[in-house]
């Protein structure tokens, strides 16, 4: 009946699929990764960069759990910047320009070196299931592959439709076919589904650009890696270049607005508001007389340059006219035009927090199919789907990170609790415990979890324990030592003290930095690592705020531990309005905490749920006594 | 998703509530339940003997400064043998809302929070105390929830509080959106507003909310009624005045001084304003034991009143007893009423700050002016806000208070240069408090605000 058999099958080898397959295989499951083109594994379909504010947090967390995006991005990175350093460490986030082909090669190498992982080129046309459970997949060539769990990571390929001006044609990505058969088969499964839209800008030939007219944006002199495992010193190999549009360019776009499929009514899907096309920016922000454009090289061995900020679905002749009016791009040659793409997604309220679908057991979804956007968001979901498929195959309890543990947990909880109507992207403002969820403590938060489930390698674990010991001994030294207040550091700054404070008290002052104390010899620590200093100093400086958050975290965890039974009958619950019953039935929350987060669910409704489960618990207990 | 946690009643905190209906009754009960109930009680309860499980103990409830609030009876029940299954304290005091609220205030200042609707029952269930009458508990609990919903719904239909709170709240969302945009979109060219500007905007929001909070006093007057006390030396016609205002024969009126020995209270409606009238025993040096008790009560009622009418007899000259009465009212909100205008006027009264009203309880002359003066007094408390907004419950008042504290902390932090991701903690705290007063503002709303204000995205 089946031609081949694997414990876990992953469909799609983008950023979600790669993490999913790697995690599952690393955890010991025989895993097959299906892609329509093995040469395009880990392709970056849009901008040539990984990380960014909040996205960099996701990459750090993936890395801390034992995932691979961070390692690959450090390896293939060609320009590194730590963003938001003018603010507190909680919102610092790394970003790196990538060599696109280098990233593909690196990721493929990582996957090929992973035991139990088998890469396959084939088109998947159907999910096979039996008694409400996924049992395998069918390929276009007729083969049937048995699977303990199936993970779908279809990106923009499901019924993908590209728009360029008046033209539209089915495609999964520039130059690649869409997944029509699989798309139609998934539409038939009964999920609530919809269409989303995203876009990408034109790519130019760097030899035809006059860079002297742009402002250069170099990388950091001291690059920050994504991965806790990266030990080598990273270096910048390229710069980016900044310029702005002007009113004459806006005029061209306005004149041609009717030819944009976004405004002609041709595109039905909803696009992300935080990544608008250039025509969107001009329509929605009439008063803004200029918009920022950043030229980002797509690699070191190519002339292709990405025009960040110019995402568009305007016809090619208009794209060319717009570019030719920009200072420095007058003679620019376009290698590929920008385009918009519409694709199918499944409303993520169809998912459990494990990313398994509620309708079909053993079927997991990750990435854009769940309504998200971004490589990092996709990779984070892929990782969790891979972990949970691997656990489910072995009948082990799934791993769900809560909102206080990781950005990954926040993203998945947002998706499964609220659903989404536009491509979902991570922001730090979505994190209510933002101060606790930092890039410098991602390992403290998550590496032990990754180790427990068998994803963190011996090497990574050793590195983590070494760092933990370093942090502990640094903290001990700071707690034990007293400050020499006669030191020139203090006299130069006219700082006087009543008595000799401990270092910890001293560091509570915002203006005193541990780095400066070390640099000027007040504290011996030349051998200390920058990331260790940041971790310790942040914990000391923000202790009051962190404690305030800890109390809230405790409240959250208590509410998360109050589980709502799967078979709860909301419609039969006295006191709940029909509106509340509808909202609760759609999501079927797993805990009181999750119920409280469903938009529109009132405090009174939450109290009634709480009352109900307490009554139920009492009844169960008294029955046991009898 | 900060909004979720605020919806969940946290069962491990100590809670307190007035558990008798609002308004005046002979006795009122305040209940405290939770791990800190005993500790909090010991902090404010002075008695000759220590509290024992299920023994009622008489003593004095004092406030934070050690000043007596009321004579009370306290019963401590120790966990788990109580209704809620937790330590449970019941404080029985005099029924005055003022007294009960002050007791509640002291308890809250020591760390307890106001109980949510039905929460005592909820805790009883959570602690397995529902073997008595489960069905009864369900009904009680659901009723409490429904009542609260009905109240909230009513408020929303009226739209009054929402209309008033929404503008400052919107402003707060806007400030939050600006600070968040600066953090999440530092890569886009988003301008970060200067500290002084942020601080000024926060201050503006505070001022609006503080003005709303001032309406709390007025709102309470509307709900509970204006407490009006009538005082004067014996036989100046207090009870006749009382009856005239009441249009009834409730109080005993005799020719002999000192016949009103108890405080009579009566609710009346004065041109749409609820009024709680208290007629008191005449203030006079007396040897009569019974009457002395009455006089003691008068002074209590005086302290408890929102407005006092000092009654003088226009047909007689001012004497030391009158002066004594006047001096009692000194510093308290009061009106001077010269009664018996139907008789020849001998009185020689003048005061720089209080103008006297001349009335005759016998003929009813001057009562129109008196009623107008009482009404004017009440309306003065209204502040300059439109008629449609008043805060009426302690819960609303408490939420506003929390919002104000958060704003104050945030505005100080902004000036100190504290990073915005930390300042935002306090701003979100304020927003959560305002969410309790009007519909919820959620993370998505803040993002909406950001995306409609700033052109984000490269």
Image (cartoon, rainbow, N blue to C red):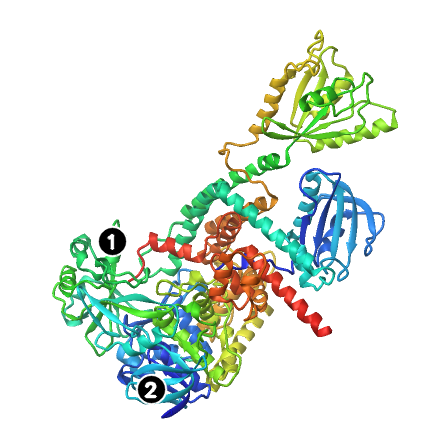
Q: Is residue A562 left or right of residue A124?
A: right
Residue positioned 44% across, 63% down in the render? A418
| Image height of A274 relative to A380, above or below | above
The percent position of residue A149, horizontal first and vertical second, equals 43, 83
Q: Is residue A167 left or right of residue A350?
A: left
Q: Is residue B165 visible?
A: yes
Q: Which residue is mark 2?
A: A109
| Image height of B246 relative to A481, above or below | above
Residues marked 1 and 2, same chain: yes
The percent position of residue B188, horizontal first and vertical second, equals 31, 59
Q: Is residue B14 visible?
A: no
The percent position of residue B449, horizontal first and vertical second, equals 38, 53
Q: Is residue A297 left or right of residue A23?
A: left
The numbered dot on residue A124 is none
Residue positioned 85% across, 50% down in the render? B49
Pick whichever of labels 1 and 2 is earlier in the sequence: 2
Residue positioned 81% across, 19% down in the render? B257
Q: Name the foreground residue: A315 vs B138.
A: B138
Which class describes the residues within 10 Å of circle 2: few (<14), some (14-19), or many (20+)? Answer: few
């Amino acid at each position: 009946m089946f031609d081949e058999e694997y414990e876990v099958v992953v469909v799609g080898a983008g950023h979600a699929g790669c993490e999913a397959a790697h995690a599952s295989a690393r955890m010991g499951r025989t895993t097959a990764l299906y892609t329509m083109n093995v040469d395009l594994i880990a392709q970056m379909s849009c901008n040539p960069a990984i990380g960014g504010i909040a996205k960099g947090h996701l990459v750090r967390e993936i890395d801390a759990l034992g995932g691979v995006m961070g390692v690959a991005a450090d390896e293939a990175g060609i320009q590194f910047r730590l963003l938001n350093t003018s603010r507190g460490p909680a919102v610092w986030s790394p970003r790196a320009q990538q060599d696109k082909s280098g990233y593909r090669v690196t990721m493929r190498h990582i996957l090929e070196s992973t035991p139990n992982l088998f890469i396959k080129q084939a088109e998947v046309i159907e999910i096979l299931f039996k008694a409400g459970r996924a049992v395998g997949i069918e390929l276009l060539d007729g083969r049937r592959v048995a699977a303990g769990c199936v993970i779908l990571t279809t990106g923009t390929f499901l019924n993908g439709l590209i728009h360029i001006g008046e033209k539209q044609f089915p495609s999964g990505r520039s130059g690649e076919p869409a997944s029509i058969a699989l798309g139609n088969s998934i539409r038939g499964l009964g999920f609530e589904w919809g269409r989303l839209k995203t876009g990408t800008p034109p790519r130019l030939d760097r030899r035809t650009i006059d860079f002297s007219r742009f402002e250069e944006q170099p990388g950091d002199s001291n690059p920050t890696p994504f991965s806790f495992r990266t030990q080598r010193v990273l270096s910048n190999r390229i710069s980016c270049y900044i310029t702005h549009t002007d009113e004459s360019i806006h005029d061209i776009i306005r004149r041609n607005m009717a030819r944009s499929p976004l405004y002609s009514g041709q595109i039905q899907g909803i696009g992300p508001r935080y990544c608008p096309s250039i025509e969107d920016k001009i329509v929605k922000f009439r008063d803004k007389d200029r918009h920022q454009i950043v030229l980002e090289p797509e690699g070191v061995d190519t002339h292709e340059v990405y025009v960040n900020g110019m995402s568009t679905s305007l016809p090619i002749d208009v794209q060319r006219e717009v570019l030719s009016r920009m200072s420095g791009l007058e003679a620019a040659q376009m290698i590929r035009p920008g385009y918009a793409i519409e694709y199918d997604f499944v409303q993520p309220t169809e998912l459990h927090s494990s990313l398994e679908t509620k309708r079909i057991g053993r079927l997991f979804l990750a990435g854009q199919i769940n309504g998200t956007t971004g490589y990092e968001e996709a990779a984070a979901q892929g990782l969790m789907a891979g972990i949970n498929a691997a656990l489910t195959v072995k009948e082990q309890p799934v791993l769900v990170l809560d909102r206080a543990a990781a950005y990954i947990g926040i993203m998945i909880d947002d998706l499964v609790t609220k659903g989404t109507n536009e491509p979902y992207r991570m922001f730090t403002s979505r994190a209510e415990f933002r101060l606790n969820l930092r890039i410098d403590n991602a390992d403290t938060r998550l590496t032990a979890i990754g180790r427990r489930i068998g994803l963190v390698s011996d090497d990574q674990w050793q590195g983590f324990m070494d760092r933990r010991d370093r942090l502990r001994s640094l903290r001990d030294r700071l707690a034990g030592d007293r400050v020499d207040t006669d030191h020139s550091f203090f006299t130069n700054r006219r700082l006087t003290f009543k008595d000799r404070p401990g270092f910890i008290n001293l560091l509570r002052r915002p203006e005193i930095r541990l780095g400066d104390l070390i640099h000027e010899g007040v504290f011996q620590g030349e051998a200390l690592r920058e990331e260790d200093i940041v971790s310790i100093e942040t914990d000391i400086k923000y202790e009051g705020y962190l404690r305030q958050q800890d109390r809230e975290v405790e409240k959250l965890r208590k509410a998360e531990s109050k589980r709502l039974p799967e078979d709860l009958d909301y419609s039969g619950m006295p006191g709940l309005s029909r509106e509340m019953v509808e909202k609760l039935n759609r999501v079927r929350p797993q805990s009181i905490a999750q119920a409280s987060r469903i938009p529109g669910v009132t405090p009174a409704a939450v109290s009634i749920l709480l009352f109900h489960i307490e009554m139920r618990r009492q009844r169960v207990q008294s029955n046991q006594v009898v | 998703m900060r909004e979720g946690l605020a919806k969940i009643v946290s069962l491990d905190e100590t809670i307190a509530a007035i558990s008798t209906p609002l308004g005046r009754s002979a006795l009122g009960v305040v209940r405290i339940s939770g791990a800190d109930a005993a500790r909090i009680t010991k902090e404010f309860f002075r008695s000759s003997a220590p509290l024992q499980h299920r023994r009622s103990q008489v003593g004095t409830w004092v406030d934070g400064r050690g000043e007596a609030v009321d004579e009370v009876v306290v019963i401590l029940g120790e966990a788990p043998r109580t209704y809620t299954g937790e330590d449970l304290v019941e404080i029985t005091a005099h029924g005055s809302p003022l007294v009960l609220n002050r007791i509640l205030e002291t308890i809250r200042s020591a760390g307890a929070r106001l109980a949510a609707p039905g929460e005592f029952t909820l805790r009883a269930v959570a602690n397995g105390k529902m073997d008595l009458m489960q069905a009864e508990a369900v009904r009680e609990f659901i009723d409490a929830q429904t009542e609260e919903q009905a109240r909230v719904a009513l408020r929303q239909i009226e739209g009054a509080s929402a209309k008033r709170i929404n503008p400052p709240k919107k402003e707060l969302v806007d400030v939050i959106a600006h600070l968040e945009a600066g953090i999440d979109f530092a890569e886009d060219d988003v301008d970060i507003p200067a500290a002084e500007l942020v601080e000024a905007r926060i201050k503006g929001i505070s001022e609006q909310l503080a003005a709303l909070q001032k309406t709390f006093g007025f709102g309470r007057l509307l709900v509970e009624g204006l407490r009006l006390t009538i005082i004067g030396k014996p036989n100046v016609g207090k009870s006749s005045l009382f009856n005239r205002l009441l249009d009834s024969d409730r109080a005993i009126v005799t020719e002999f001084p000192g016949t009103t020995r108890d405080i009579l209270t009566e609710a009346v409606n004065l041109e749409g304003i609820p009024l709680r009238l208290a007629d008191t025993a005449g203030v006079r040096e007396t040897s009569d034991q019974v009457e002395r008790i009455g006089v003691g009560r008068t002074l209590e009622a005086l302290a408890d009143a929102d407005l006092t009418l000092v009654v003088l007899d226009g047909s007689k000259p001012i004497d030391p007893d009158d002066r004594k009465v006047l001096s009692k009212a000194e510093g308290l909100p009061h009106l001077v009423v010269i009664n018996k205008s139907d008789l020849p006027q001998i009185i020689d009264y003048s005061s720089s700050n209080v103008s006297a009203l001349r009335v005759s309880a016998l003929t009813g002359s001057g009562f129109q002016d008196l009623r107008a003066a009482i009404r004017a007094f009440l309306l003065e408390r209204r502040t300059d806000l439109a008629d449609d907004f008043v805060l009426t419950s302690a819960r609303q008042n408490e939420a506003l208070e929390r919002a104000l504290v958060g704003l104050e902390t945030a505005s100080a932090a902004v000036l100190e240069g504290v990073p915005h991701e930390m300042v935002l903690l306090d701003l979100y705290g304020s927003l959560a408090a305002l969410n309790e007063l009007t519909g919820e503002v959620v993370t998505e709303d803040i993002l909406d605000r950001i995306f409609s204000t700033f052109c984000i995205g490269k």
